[in-house]
Amino acid sequence: MRFLFLLAVFQWGIATLGMTQGQGERIKWALAQQGKQLNPAEQAELFEFYQKREFKPIWLVDGFPNRQALAYQEILSQIHYEGLDPEDYQFSRISLLYSQFSSRNSVPFTPELDEWEVLLTTSFYRLVNHLYYGKIDPEPLPGIWKVYKKKKPQVAIHFLTRLPMDPNLTRIFGELRPPDARYWSGVELMKQLQEEMKDFPSGFNEISFSQTLELGEKSIHLPLIRERLAQLGYSSGNDSGSDPTEFDSITWLAIKKLQKENRLEPDGVIGKNTLAVLNASPTSKMDQISVNLERMRWMPQEFWEGKRIVVNVADFQMSYLDDADTLFTSEIIVGTVKNQTPIFSAELDHLVFSPYWNVPLSIIQNELIPAIRRNPDYLARNKMEVTSHAGKVIHPSSVHWDLRPFPYLIRQKPGPHNSLGLVKFMFPNPYQVYLHDTPAKQLFFKASRAFSHGCIRMKKPQEFAEILLKDNPNWTIQKIREAMTRDQETQVDLNEKIPVWVLYFTFWMDEKGQPKFIQDVYGLDREVLRLLNK
């Protein structure tokens, strides 16, 4: 009797092993069919995941989709509000298979179950990575972009392993997304804009003309411009009894308001940039939000917390934050389109009062030497001097200006004339970019402020220095002011380093929770959008 029992157990084990091996082969085959979605390493990672759990399904119970599978389908149906394409995650195929399962009273065929199981797993695997790291690798993008999360091994596998133990998919996906209310504000605005599309049943008519329009001029486009201003909440109608093709004062005031709220020169003239704002359809705004939700997904966890300095190049604005609290803000000037301010992170560790400006070699060769040749008094007039690399001052008459590479340094002496102004804030980086004062204060009256060689000029540098040193008893406000008016540099090391994030966001939420659509001054949105839609 005991022999027959052991024989039965042995035969059951052999049968189970065969079933498990057969299921393993089917899972392996189904994973291979997802080759377009997964590379060989990812396929191997998922096969190992299933092998460890003896090929037990995670999306099926008794041959039918479980609650998590249904919840995941709902998440996929809403993922376009986060700027991601549901078809990147096989949404249509998943929905089709589910509808086929739902229409039957019997358990689906085994091949269909295998396809369903692996389809959801590969979809989940890909979506986890895209929500956690971003869909796009930012490093190869145009310009210098050096801010992104460092890849960790098997992040998606970690969340897949949690699925059988944690049925709350909402909680799991909440951990994947950026931990900031602005991300969710962007998602909600996407939903509102999609509703607004219903207001344009025949499409969004673009206003197009090449000339500029000024107060008092006439154009056949002005009735449509007024209609668009009314749709955007800026104006309605025109001066009573005036010619509808005339640029009247009511329209002029509405245009100025639109320009001011969209960071354009509020001159009331309808030119290329104003026309672009007028032509910003709900669809184009959704595209802009999508690009910037993706940029938020690139950001490491440490960006969202603690004390930090955040420079938004596109917005011409910098902020000093402590968690969600704003301690200080200042308008800034950034690099020109030709000399773009790079996107990177570093740590502010010291500031320098009454700094010398050590002129970069590229500026020496491309700008200073030609200027010196035209005017031998150029250096003296601009309070500049030539030095050796050891710091010895050299008379300009003994310099051979044609030497390449140029073997000397040129620096500008401290003072109100200095291009760095009266203080600079240093965060060592390979781009020689830092925050500093400027003597050219008049440029802060401009709405668009891309004027520098790449460094970041501040409107309120003294206030920032006072905030940074407020806990240092050796640096009173009076001593700071004195240090900013000397003819020699004074370096002050900070007690603690402060992370600096130089970023580029063309959509953001301001402190009042209002959306900001910002001009893409460097033209960096286009390629991100193309890759998101690829």
Image (spheres, rainbow, N blue to C red):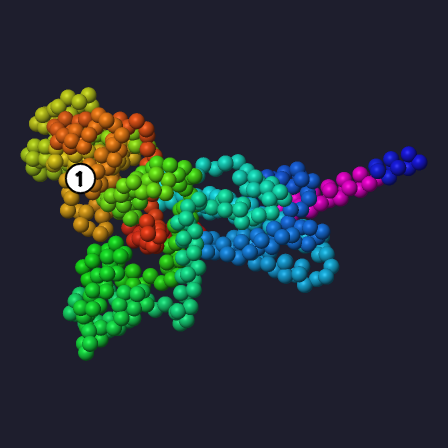
521 sits left or right of 364 in the view: right
The answer to whether one can see residue 87 in this image is no
187 to 354, vertically: above or below: below
Magenta part of the chain: 11-33
- Please state, as top left, top right, bottom left or bottom right, where the N terminus lies in the image: top right
When the figure is inspected, residue 519 is found, relative to residue 7, above or below; the finding is below
Amino acid identity at mark 1: Thr
454 is higher (above) or lower (below) than 406: below
Where is residue 24 shown, x and y percent of the image?
69, 43
Name which residue lies at 28% across and 50% down: 521
Query: Foreground: 366 or 528?
Result: 528
Q: Residue sitting at 30 percent across and 32 percent down?
A: 348
* Residue at the bottom extreme of this rendering: 241
Residue 273 image offset from top left, x and y in percent: 26, 58
Q: Which residue is mark 1?
A: 438
Is residue 328 within the magenta segment? Answer: no
Q: Quadrant of residue 14?
A: top right
Say left or right for 24 vs 456. right
The structure residue drawn at horizontal position 67% and vertical position 40%, both measured from the top left corner, is: 53
Query: How far across and how far down the image is residue 149, in percent?
Result: 44, 39
